[in-house]
Structures are given as C-alpha cells and as structure tokens.
Amino acid sequence: PSLFSLLQYGLGTVVSATKASAGLPQAGDEYDFYRSFTGFQDFCESQGDNLLRCMSQIMKHHGCRSHMMNQNTLTGQEDRFDLMVDSNDAILERVGILLDEADGVNRTQGPVMPAGFQPPKIVVSSWNRKGSGSGGRSEMFRLLHAKNVARPQLKFKEKVDNSNTPFIPKIFIKPNAVKPLPSYFTNKQMHKEKPEDLDVPAALADFIHQQRTQENVVDMCAHPYQYELDHLMIPESLLSKSEPQLYKPVAETKCSFITTLEELAALNEKLCQLSEFAVDLEHHSYRSFLGITCLMQISTREEDFIIDTLELRSEMYILNEAFTDPAIVKVFHGADSDIEWLQRDFGLYVVRLFDTHQASRALNLARHSLDHLLTHFCNVASDKRYQLADWRIRPLPEEMVQYARADTHYLLYIYDCVRAQLLDFNHGQPGLLKSVWDRSRDISLKKYMKPIFTEESYLELQRKQKKSFNTQQLAAFRLLFAWRDKLARQEDESTGYVLPTHMMIKISEELPKEPQGIIACCNPVPPLVRQQVNELHLLVQQAREMPLLK
C-alpha cells in the first residue's frame, strides 16, 4: 500500500477511537444505574482490561514503561494516568525526531566525522573568563565528560561577547563609502584601550563608552551601509539578457585553501578585479551561544577558494573592499542568515547582492533549495553526507573541502540561468528581475541582533510551545529559562546544549521534589545539568513555594 493510503487508514482509526472515547458514559448518564448490574460490571472490566493491554503493548513497542496491568506497581488511576502522560511525551518526542529526519534534520545524530577522525579529548568550560593571580588559570576550566572538537573560541584574538547588551557593528573602516563612517567607529580602537574596559568584550566596552559619553545608541546600532544600499541603482547591464557561461568541471578548477593573512589579501585583490563572484558559509551553532562561522567558500568563473574563517576571523574585514563594491555582484543562495553571520563575526557587509533563492521564488520553481537548483540547471546531485558535519574540525578533511566548494562552484552559472529565465518569464521586460534585485538589496539591509534576555523573555517561548502551566509550573519555567540563558552566555554554549526546551518543560511540569527527579526528566542528561543539579533543585523548590493557582 502507498504511504498516503496508510496515513488515511491510520487517521480513520484515530478518528473512530476519538469518537468512541467521547461517547463513553459520564456522571449523570445513568452510568451509576447500569453499574449496579453484575453483567454490565463484568463487561466494563473486560473491555477495560483489553484497553490496558493494548496500551501496554503500544508503550512496550515504543520502549516506554508498560506495566499498566501490574496491580503491584500501580496503586490507582492517577498512577496509570501519569504513566500514560510520560509515554505520550516520549512517543511524541520520537515523532518529532522522525519528522525532522524526514526534513533532513537528525537531532539524535552527532556531528558527522570523516572515517578515522578522532576528535581530541580536551578540558573545556568557563573558558571565557579571565583568571587572576597564580590560581587564576585553574579556575578557567572545568571538566565536561564528553568527546569534544577543540573549541576554536580559545584561539580568537577578541573575546566572544555574550553579554546581554545590543550588538554594536564591528566595522572601523568603510571601503566604498558614499556616506562616511561615524567618528565613533573610526575611533573604536581608542575606546578599547581605556584601562577600565580592557577586561570586557569589545562590544561591551563600546556600550559602556556610549553610556558614559551619551552618544546616540541608535546611531551606534545603525547599518553602516544603510545610505549606500538605500541609494543603490541597478545598471542596465544587470537588467538585460546575457548568455549563461557554463561552469568549468570541478576536476579542472583550481581550489585554494586560504589560511594566512597574505593569502587573504591576495584573494581580496583578485576579487576586486572581477564583475561577480559566489559566496557561501558553513556555520556551527550547537557548542556556541551566538554561533560561529567556520568556513567561507568563494567561487569565481575560474577558481574556487575555501577560507578558514576560524583562523582568519580577525582579518576577514579586509574583504569589505570587494564585498561592498557596488560594481561587483555577490551571488548567494538563501542569504538571510549569511548576511547576519558576516556582520556578527567579521564586520563584513554586502552591497550588490543577488540571492538565487529569491530568484527561484520569483520563478515559481517546484522547490527553492540549492539542491533543487543544482539538479534543475546543472544536472548535479548534491552530496548530503556532510549536511550535519561539525565544521569546526581542523584540519579539515579533503572530503569536506570538496563538499563545501560544491555549494558555490555552480552558483554563478545558476545566477546566469535564473536571470535569463526571469526576463523570459516576463516577456523580456526587466520588472521581475528588478524585483529580485530589490529583494536581495533588502536582505543586505538586514542587521544582526543579539538575543537580549528580559524578565518577560520566557513568555514568548511559552507561547510558542503552547503550554498551559499553573502558577508553580510557570514560576519554575521562568526560573529555569533565566538559569539556562545565564549559563549559556557564561559557558558559551547554546541554550539547547545547556538544557533542551523539551526537558525544561518536563521539569517545569513535574516539579521534582528531589535532585534525582530532575535527572529523571532528562534523557540523555546534559552535562551542565548534571553539574548544576543542586542549583536547579533549589530553583524548583523556590517555584513549589509559590501559591498554587490553576
């Protein structure tokens, strides 16, 4: 049978079961009268046992506790109900995981490692704080019992700024400027050198300086290239049809791995001589609070380049000369996140962006993914083996380098093809193509915004999860949310690594009386939860002391 027929059959069964459940007698439906007859009692008990047996089989099939029939283990209906709720949670979580896998996301799978790769075991945690005195160094690290890729943050020249303050653009020189950069940014180095600001992240030092001098925080957070993008004109050459230029075969195309400042500067000079190039990024977000851009791929008509952005993080800003030149087209696919990551990590901005994702949408193609465009225009099947790869790995294996370069190698040809089709689609008129240029410019205007914690932040997550809590549960959710945010910033870990949301909800609903109950709500137990279980227990106790209101 087809998947659709199976789904229809399953849905019909669920609907029938729901109707039968809704039709069960309730108080006042003469149930008590019929219950006085022995035959009716026997029938109800027989059917009840059948239902419990069926439920036990379903629970056992899904690996849940399944002693619904065990009178010694369960003392009443309340215990059975709790067991059923726990099983439902586990089954629904598994359904969510399977749906994610169907969409190409595997939450249960660890980072993809090439065969033979052994990530180093290192001591990490609390690394982002400076020690003081002779004992300072020993306070910088605590052991996490897990296999970890070496944390690239340890080598960054600038401390990662996880502070609960607005993001201040990192830019301090502005190539291709029509409107000069405000003096605040050009004097940025002077602000950092104030003695009282030396021991805080650069952006926090900027924020402190702004507060002291009463500079306008709106100007500080403004998009540095707002004026240039607002006044960006589209030349006739970019609105007219041209013959697509076929890509060179991968085997015949030089690929350079850029790891030094000299190589990066040479690449920038080369890019400045071109009329277009393609760009993509590889990102990591699980073992970092804000996320880390691990790799940048750039392709020209003749060459491919892979830039180690972990090694060159502090020098990447020099590419602004090419990235902000309006005479050079920068081709991305799905640039919404890329634009923000470039600003956050490197102070890079893009002027004259063309987003092939927006072009695909304007053309009403069947799907808008890069995979589909590669198949549709290039007859190339993308390699999905490294979709979940941990791009922090160094040295980067050759298989991952080849996977990364494929994302941009064909993109300029796709850019040629979609431009031609946009003109054909609109009978040679440039209106549709112009709309894609305009949408792409709007994406370039996006500004990176740091996640800011407020006393009401937890309410937004609660609304998204559509959870109804009583006062004690809501208090626990609020306290756990604040604890998770604080620890994630402090340890530079994602909130999902510190305490996944579904576990946080489980603890809030259960309100365990003992620390072991908190551990029981988490499977597997996050390392920082195991470390901090006593602190979590105090938070849950604090919530339990709240007046109970439904």
Image (spheres, grey):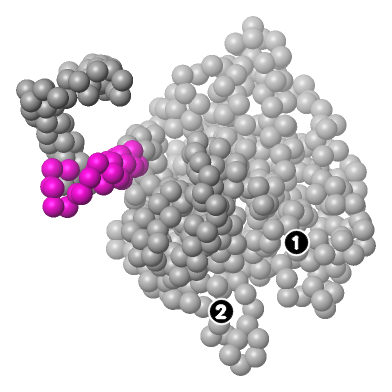
Q: Are marks 1 and 2 in contact (CB under 8 Å)?
A: no
Question: Left or right: 359 with respect to 204?
Answer: left
The picture places residue 159, in percent across and down from the top left corner, at 66, 68
Tag 1: Cα neighbours inside 10 Å, few (<14), some, or many (≥20)?
many
Front residue of 78 and 181: 78
Q: Return the residue at label 2.
A: 140
The picture places residue 321, in percent across and down from the top left corner, at 76, 49
Residue drawn at 60 percent across, 71 percent down: 128
Q: How many marks?
A: 2
Residue drawn at 86 percent across, 38 percent down: 227
> Is residue 317 visible from the viewing direction of this image?
no
- Is label 2 in a helix, a strand or a loop? loop
Question: Left or right: 509 with respect to 226?
Answer: left
Residue drawn at 89 percent across, 42 percent down: 178
**Overall secondary structure of the magenta section:** helix
Q: Quadrant of the N terminus?
A: top left
The residues tagged by marks 1 and 2 sit, at their Cα atoms, a distance apart of 22 Å
Q: Which residues are magenta?
A: 68-94
Q: What amino acid is labelled 2 in the image? A: Met
